[in-house]
Image (cartoon, helix red, strand yellow):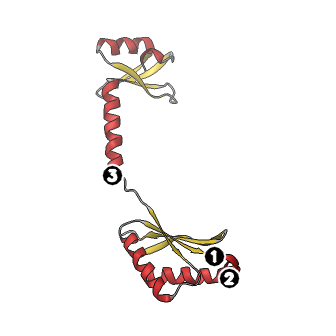
Amino acid sequence: MNEEIREKEIRVISGDGEQLGLMSSKEALKIAEEKDLDLVMISPNAKPPVCKIMDYGKFLYEQTKKDKEAKKKQKVINIKEIRVSPTIEEHDIDIKAKNARKFLIDGNKVKITVRFRGREAEHSAVGNVILDKFFNKLEEHCIIEKPAKLEGRNMIMILAPKKA
């Protein structure tokens, strides 16, 4: 910005977007000072670098305003976790699937964890069966984002809501 621009020759654009052409950085700075504005380098990697004559304070204000607006439009996605054991009964799977359905409808991802204790880890196929049952009950509301995988003593599967 202003005196910090060390390039000898730059392409200059006026505040209203009009091309002023190639000139030395001193000339451009002089034009900017006459208009009581700043000379700001927009694309330093271009040959020659492109600079714009503008009010830098106003530019920063507009930029933060745009960033805040973009942040408002972002949707935060949470991951809700549901833990089950390998000895879970069918009715309990139904209840937990009903809760998971609520989370998915709200737009959250669901992480289903089958926790193995002691020697249960040797029967990891049981975990696959439980996770498959779980997914089959929620199939119309979700897709599998991360398939079932054994990580240590836990088998994890992540479900994401279907796009409407």
Task: Kindly tell me whether residue 139 is visible in this rendering.
Answer: no
Q: Element at badge 3?
A: helix
Horizontal side, residue 73 vs residue 149: left or right: left
Quadrant that contains the N terminus: top left
Residue marked by disc 3:
73
Between the C-alphas of marks 3 and 1, the distance is 40 Å
Quarter residue 85 falls in: bottom right
CB under 8 Å between discs 2 and 3: no
Q: Quadrant of the C terminus?
A: bottom left
Q: Residue at the location (33% across, 29% down)?
A: 59
Comparing labels 1 and 2, the label whose residue is closer to the camera: 1
Q: Earlier in the sequence, mark 2 or mark 3?
A: 3
Visible residue check, residue 81: yes
Q: Marks 1 and 2: CB-CB under 8 Å?
A: yes
The amino acid pointed to by label 1 is Phe
Q: Position of residue 5 (x, y in %)?
A: 47, 18
* Point 58% across, 71% down: residue: 156
Q: Residue furthest front?
A: 118
Instruction: Residue type at mark 3: give it.
Output: Lys
The residue positioned 68% from the left and 82% from the top of the image is 123
Residue under label 2? 123
Secondary structure at badge 1 equals: loop
Of labels 1 and 2, earlier in sequence is 1
Q: CA distance from mark 1 to mark 2?
A: 9 Å
The residue labelled by disc 1 is: 116
Badge 3 vs badge 1, beta-carbon distance below 8 Å: no
Q: Position of residue 26 (x, y in %)?
A: 43, 11
